[in-house]
Image (cartoon, rainbow, N blue to C red):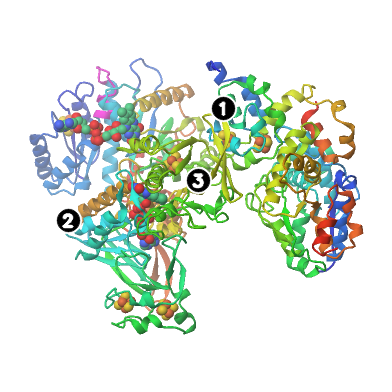
């Protein structure tokens, strides 16, 4: 027979005014297994708690009920008090007779409130009888983090974590970190040069002792859970020994072959052995294997000959490395929508129709034109440039329905750069709305219009075509209500910001969610903006959706602070409310596996002595399980149950109704 | 490829004022090695796909054509872009919209389910025959002829229903002309409208739109304009003198059906191509290029 | 021109009827201007396509009815093809034409069409023209 | 062991007994807010707190009816707001198959209510309880299962 104690709280007059607490206690005393009852003025006060501890000890109670306020208020208090008296804290249950009874049933005769309190307390008592002692789950935390993606968001996160004294591995799939920001010329709203503010950060990341750079690398596999991830990284062969390379650039100099530069978006060529851009970090070239004649046809080898330290190895292979980390920050960024999708704008057909990012390269002093705005077809300086906004954005039919958020700003920036660089040139901007929310953003756009003379036309462009060597831009100016046509020398498309190709594959490897555009889902868009549903995995920057540099950086720092908070203790304690599988009855239907929103359930092989698999069963990973109980309801053979909310406990409560 | 017989819907115009479109196509087919088998029973498709979805009656005429085609095979080919557009869109409605299918079948007293595959003659050449094979059959390459391939509207739009090629940057037509030895030119208005049925009451607009098509073609260096639709053909040819009148820099060029160009390249007897039924004259160009 | 706007206009039953006939939802239009920009006949229209949509949103169907726009639309579908919102102004204009034609009125009487045209023009132009202009 | 205290309203007459299964994060907190705001509502509901509506087993509901409930209410977070991201979707998906089961078990579907109440929707909670109580009251006691419990007890 259990020995249960029931403590009914009066909460001053808060409960006692409409609930006869004495009667509740008396009634409960009549139930089998209840060996102690009382009612008291303030259970949560120090004397109240002391009384509770005393009663447990004196009456050798093995379970207690406190009928008082909401468990959200004092469950922790009373469980701690019970623990102080040597009771397992999960043998203490709360009945809510304040928020659910006294405060909502104002009947002064106390009839309704008392009856309901008695019912609720009885239900809790019956439930308590089925309780099992539980232990908090302790998870050791590996205090090393991984950041995936070395754009500005990832760099910032890595630097902040390193600054906090923890080790970080920064994984970047390109030969250099820097991401899209490395391509930009000057940046809104302050117009500082992108390279000037980015390069120091890149170098810092390279030099910081706590940061290990894995460039030209990709995450292949992720196992484990918060505090204990095991990540397999493929380090693609650079064909250059990173340790020995001095970055002298001789090899690049001597390589006789050129191909289109991806970094320059086709506006320029690069060698087959290359660094993406001069300020690359690390400053170690890689060989573009599919284009290298040595690797493909065993001819050439010029680079290896000139390399002083002899670090070129044409036989080098990819390496798989495994890293154990406690937290992961995902900062894989964005790409631009392919412009070819909009045949009406002639991109790819008309040479001087370029993308906004290509314009950045033209305007960049380290770009293919040394910062002069020259059009790709003939190198002439364009005297009129038409900018088309919302290309692919806000276009449900052919593009994406969302607003890309940054293009209004960077287009205004482009008109400014253009007017500074080409005197007498005229820029035209076709826009639908100008979205310039942010500190000093609206002023920035107004400046482009009022001081730099950009002509803003409200309307979309319908088509772009060539006529007598000019580019004709045909659209509407909805403010005057007319069709308009402009003869331009160059057209710049502000193409939509979209998720990276392969973003979904990475998300699946990490077990994080993504939306229909393959942007990663934050746990809560307002209150948990850098967390994911998978504990221990955080997000930063444009892998979540369009944003500008300030936001990306803020998120990098936010994610880093989450990681540092996690790393501040050696282990994490978690509520033991997790599911367990009954291995004898589980028939491996995997319904629970599909149902679990956290992919917390794994398939486990049961082997015989010889090591042959005899059977499969489901297995819950305590580190991952969040205790929602969805799996329990999904299991048809009743082979999985949720600790703290077992079927037995719930049925006991229902049966006591 | 074994001998192919493809059910064929000529439509009313190809039976009358655009006879040369029809005959040149049939002849070319037989040279390439397939047969266009005219439907034994057909009626006018209505020449307009009703743009308002509540107009189901407008779909009955094309539905009748489709249901008789069903009895003769599982594909149906057309030449005229308008017929193609109307039949293909109607077919899609019947296939995808059960409610409308029932209403339409009730009207035409047939049980048609939308299972006929509608192919434009260009698609037959591209997908069933293959442009390579067409190229192989060329006897009289249209060498040195800069040709403007004028798509117009109905062959391409709406993309979701038609899908013959990319709506804004199609190439099927150019690819054919290239196979025939001609040099297709890229011109601005190749997918813009010629003025269509406004021919009936608004010459001004038709001249303007057709004029833009032709001037942009000629500006791009075209010496010949090739069409896929009798109405385009009519509007362009009819407007050309007026365009030349108002724009002194404009040199008129011959306008022909693509099947005429095809027949020419395949070595068909020039006399049988019906060029005399066109109101523009292709002969000087052919002479100049040493083709005739 | 000043447009007075009242609740009755915004909730106009006539516009709702037009929406039903055309299968379009005028609210979908976000006034980007692409249709006016691309419409080949826009230049000759008294109210270009984008403005047609705006007038209908405001419930001002009267002015749209009076304009030449619907009779100039060639049904080329450039508006629909490029509308980011998937709106077919062509269908709206057809709906407006149908309103007139279904009442038996005509834009063009058969006797007004010149005989040489009837003789030489492709049948399809005549059939289509009749469908678009004759009630 | 069941020992439902028979009770009647101060006015006398029939008072239905209603069991509510609510999630811990949204609806339970919403009900708490009704309390802290001192709102008043009908006293007929007994809450059982679960982590998520996704935890609810159809048998819980059938058992509630067996134990004398005249109506059952299920309430959790709004779609998209689930604390466990998709738990409530699972719950909703399950209802579909589950409705048939209920009907098969002879339960009048009007006695089973589903709702979404967020942590801030105290008013919605109050209105919901009042509405459900009145509706069940109008339906009268759920007699189909009455006595079932007793027979079971005799046998087992
Ligand atoms: C034309 C243009 C102009 C702009 N101008 C401005 C401006 O003036 N001011 C401003 O504030 N913002 C501007 N922006 C926005 C700015 O580019 C972004 O806000 C910023 O670059 C986002 O940084 P990020 O780190 O989130 O992403 P990214 O820069 O995209 O970095 C992501 C990094 O992750 C790497 N990566 C991707 N996938 C993987 C993987 N699977 N494994 C490993 N690594 C991976 C990528 O190689 C890349 O290095 C502009 C954007 C454009 C398009
Ligand atoms: C009408 C309206 C509707 C909105 N709706 C939304 C919405 O739907 N969604 C959304 O995301 N955002 C919304 N917002 C924006 C949202 O309110 C803010 O983003 C958010 O509240 C900002 O929080 P905060 O902590 O920065 O500032 P605040 O909420 O202003 O908090 C600052 C706190 O600091 C205290 N304080 C100030 N000075 C001192 C001092 N010297 N010493 C000590 N304490 C001090 C203040 O008393 C206050 O408690 C809305 C805003 C408005 C005006
Ligand atoms: S335990 Fe809760 S109900 Fe009791 S006195 Fe404290 S606050 Fe009030
Ligand atoms: S071996 Fe390859 S990378 Fe080296 S110089 Fe030759 S082509 Fe360039
Ligand atoms: S020559 Fe050798 S050391 Fe110099 S950059 Fe090339 S690989 Fe590095
Ligand atoms: S930010 Fe401006 S240009 Fe970019 S999608 Fe939004 S509204 Fe269009
Ligand atoms: S309780 Fe929820 S999180 Fe845990 S295993 Fe079951 S479904 Fe997954
Ligand atoms: S649903 Fe139940 S039986 Fe099926 S695998 Fe999971 S625990 Fe095993
Ligand atoms: S293109 Fe579409 S959204 Fe834009 S103005 Fe025209 S109808 Fe409206
Ligand atoms: S269908 Fe009519 S409104 Fe639309 S673009 Fe063509 S002519 Fe203009």
**Which is the main secondary structure of the residues drawn in magenta?**
loop
Q: Quadrant of the C terminus of chain A?
A: top left
* Front one among A60 and A498: A498
The span picked out in magenta is A98-110
Label number found at residue A167: none
Q: Chain of mark 1?
A: C
Q: CA distance from mark 2 to mark 3?
A: 48 Å
Which residue does the image show at 55% across and 21% down from the upper left?
C10
Tell me the residue that label 2 is attached to.
A569
Which residue does the image show at 34% across and 63% down from the upper left?
A172
Is residue B280 placed above or below A111 in the rendered structure?
A: below
Which residue does the image show at 78% across and 70% down from the upper left?
B136
* Front one among A535 and B16: B16
Q: Residues within 10 Å of mark 2 (few under 14, many from 20)?
A: few
* Front one among A105 and C26: C26
Tell me the residue that label 3 is attached to.
A391
Q: Quadrant of ligand 9?
A: top right
């Amino acid at each position: 027979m259990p020995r249960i104690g029931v403590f009914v709280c009066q909460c001053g007059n808060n409960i006692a005014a409409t609930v006869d607490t004495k009667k509740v206690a008396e009634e409960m005393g009549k139930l089998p297994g209840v060996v102690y009852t009382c009612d008291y003025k303030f259970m949560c006060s120090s004397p109240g708690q002391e009384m509770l501890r005393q009663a447990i000890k004196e009456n050798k109670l093995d379970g207690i009920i406190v009928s008082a306020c909401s468990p959200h208020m004092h469950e922790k208090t009373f469980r701690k008090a019970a623990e102080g008296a040597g009771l397992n804290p999960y043998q203490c249950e709360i009945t809510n007779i304040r928020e659910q009874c006294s405060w909502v049933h104002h009947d002064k005769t106390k009839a309704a409130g008392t009856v309901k309190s008695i019912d609720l307390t009885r239900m809790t008592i019956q439930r308590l009888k089925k309780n099992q002692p539980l232990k908090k789950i302790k998870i050791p935390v590996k205090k090393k983090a991984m950041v995936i993606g070395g754009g500005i968001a990832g760099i910032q996160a890595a630097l902040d974590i390193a600054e906090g004294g923890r080790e970080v591995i920064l994984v970047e799939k390109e030969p250099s970190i820097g991401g899209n920001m490395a391509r930009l010329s000057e940046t809104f709203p302050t117009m500082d040069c992108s390279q000037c503010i980015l390069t120091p950060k890149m170098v810092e990341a390279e030099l910081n002792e706590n940061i290990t750079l894995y460039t030209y690398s990709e995450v292949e596999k992720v196992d484990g859970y918060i505090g204990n991830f095991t990540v397999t990284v493929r380090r693609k062969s650079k064909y250059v020994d990173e340790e020995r390379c001095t970055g002298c650039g001789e090899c690049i100099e001597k390589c006789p072959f050129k191909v289109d530069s991806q970094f320059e978006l086709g506006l320029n060529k690069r060698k087959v052995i290359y660094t993406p851009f001069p300020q690359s970090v690390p400053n170690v070239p890689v060989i573009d294997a599919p284009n290298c004649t040595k690797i493909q046809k065993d001819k050439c080898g010029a680079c290896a000959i000139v390399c002083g330290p002899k670090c070129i190895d044409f036989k080098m292979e990819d390496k798989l490395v495994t890293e154990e980390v406690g937290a992961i920050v995902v900062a894989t960024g964005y790409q631009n929508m392919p412009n070819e999708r909009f045949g009406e704008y002639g991109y790819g057909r008309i040479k001087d129709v370029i993308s906004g990012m290509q314009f950045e390269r033209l305007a960049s002093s380290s770009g293919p034109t040394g910062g002069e705005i020259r059009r790709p077809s003939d190198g002439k300086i364009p005297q009129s440039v038409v900018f088309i906004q919302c290309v692919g954005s806000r276009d449900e039919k052919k593009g994406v329905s969302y607003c890309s958020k940054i293009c209004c700003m960077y287009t205004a920036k482009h008109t400014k750069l253009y007017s500074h660089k080409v005197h007498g040139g005229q820029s035209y901007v076709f826009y639908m709305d100008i979205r310039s929310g942010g500190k000093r953003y609206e002023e920035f756009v107004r400046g482009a219009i009022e001081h730099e003379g950009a002509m803003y036309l409200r309307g979309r462009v319908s088509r772009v075509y060539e006529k007598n060597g000019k580019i004709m831009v045909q659209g509407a100016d909805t403010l005057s209500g007319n069709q308009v046509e402009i003869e331009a020398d160059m057209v710049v498309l502000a193409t939509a910001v979209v998720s990276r190709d392969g973003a979904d594959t990475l998300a699946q490897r990490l077990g994080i969610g993504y939306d229909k555009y393959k942007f990663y889902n934050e746990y809560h868009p307002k209150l948990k903006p850098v967390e994911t549903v998978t504990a221990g995995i955080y997000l930063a920057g444009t892998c979540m959706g369009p944003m500008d540099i300030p936001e990306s950086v803020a998120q990098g720092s936010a994610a880093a602070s989450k990681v540092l908070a996690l790393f501040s203790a050696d282990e994490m304690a978690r509520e033991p409310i997790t599911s367990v599988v009954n291995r004898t009855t589980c028939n491996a239907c995997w319904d629970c596996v599909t149902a679990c929103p956290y992919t917390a359930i794994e398939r486990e092989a049961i082997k015989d002595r010889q090591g042959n698999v005899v059977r499969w069963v489901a297995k819950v990973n305590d580190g991952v399980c969040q205790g929602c109980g969805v799996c329990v309801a999904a299991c048809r053979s009743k082979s999985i149950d949720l600790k703290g909310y077992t079927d037995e406990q719930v049925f006991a409560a229902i049966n006591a109704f | 490829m074994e001998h192919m017989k493809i059910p064929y819907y000529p439509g009313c115009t190809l039976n009358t004022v655009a006879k040369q479109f029809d005959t040149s196509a049939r002849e070319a087919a037989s040279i390439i090695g397939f047969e266009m088998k005219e439907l034994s029973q057909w009626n006018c498709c209505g020449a307009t796909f009703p743009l308002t979805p509540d107009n189901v009656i407008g779909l009955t005429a094309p539905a009748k054509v489709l249901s008789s085609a069903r009895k003769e095979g599982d594909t149906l080919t057309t030449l005229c872009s308008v017929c193609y557009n109307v039949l293909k869109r109607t077919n899609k409605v019947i296939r995808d919209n059960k409610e409308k299918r029932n209403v339409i079948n009730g009207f035409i007293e047939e049980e048609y389910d939308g299972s006929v595959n509608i192919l434009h003659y260009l698609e037959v050449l591209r997908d069933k025959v293959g442009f390579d094979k067409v190229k192989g059959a060329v006897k009289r390459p249209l060498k040195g002829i800069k040709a403007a391939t004028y798509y117009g509207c109905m062959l391409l739009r709406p993309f979701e229903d038609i899908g013959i090629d990319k709506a804004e940057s199609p190439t099927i037509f150019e690819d054919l002309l290239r196979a025939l030895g001609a040099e297709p030119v890229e011109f601005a208005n190749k997918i813009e409208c010629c003025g269509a049925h406004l021919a009936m009451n608004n010459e001004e607009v038709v001249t303007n739109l057709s004029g833009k098509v032709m001037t942009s073609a000629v500006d791009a260096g075209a010496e010949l304009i090739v069409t896929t639709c009798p109405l385009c053909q009519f509007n362009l040819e009819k407007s050309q003198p007026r365009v030349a009148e108002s724009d002194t820099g404009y040199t008129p060029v011959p306008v022909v059906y693509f099947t005429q160009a095809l027949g020419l390249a395949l070595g068909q007897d020039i006399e049988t191509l019906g060029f005399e039924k066109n109101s523009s004259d292709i002969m000087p160009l052919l002479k100049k290029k040493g083709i005739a | 021109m000043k447009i007075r706007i009242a609740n009755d206009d915004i909730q106009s039953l006539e516009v709702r009827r037009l929406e039903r006939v055309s299968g379009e939802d005028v609210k979908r239009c976000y006034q980007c201007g692409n249709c006016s920009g691309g419409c080949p006949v826009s230049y000759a229209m008294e109210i270009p396509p984008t403005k047609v949509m705006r007038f209908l949103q405001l419930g001002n169907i009267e002015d749209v009815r009076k304009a030449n726009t619907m009779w100039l639309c060639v049904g080329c579908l450039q508006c629909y093809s490029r509308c980011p919102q998937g709106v077919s102004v062509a269908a709206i204009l057809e709906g407006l034409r149908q309103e007139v034609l279904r009442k038996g009125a005509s834009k063009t009487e058969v006797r007004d069409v010149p005989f040489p045209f009837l003789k030489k023009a492709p049948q399809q132009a005549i059939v289509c023209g009749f469908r678009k202009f004759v009630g | 062991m069941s020992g439902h205290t028979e009770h009647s309203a101060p006015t006398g007459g029939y008072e239905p007994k209603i069991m509510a299964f609510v999630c811990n994060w949204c609806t339970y907190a919403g009900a708490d807010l009704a309390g802290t705001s001192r709102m008043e509502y009908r006293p007929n509901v007994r809450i059982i707190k679960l982590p998520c509506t996704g935890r609810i087993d159809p048998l819980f509901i059938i058992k509630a009816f067996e134990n004398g409930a005249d109506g059952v209410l299920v309430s959790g977070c709004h779609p998209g707001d689930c604390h466990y991201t998709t738990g409530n979707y699972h719950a909703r998906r399950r209802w579909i198959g589950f409705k048939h089961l209920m009907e098969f078990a002879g339960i009048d579907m009007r006695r089973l209510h589903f709702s979404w109440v967020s942590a801030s929707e105290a008013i919605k909670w109050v209105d919901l309880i009042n509405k459900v109580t009145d509706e069940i009251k109008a339906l009268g006691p759920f007699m189909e299962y009455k006595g079932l419990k007793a027979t079971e007890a005799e046998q087992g």
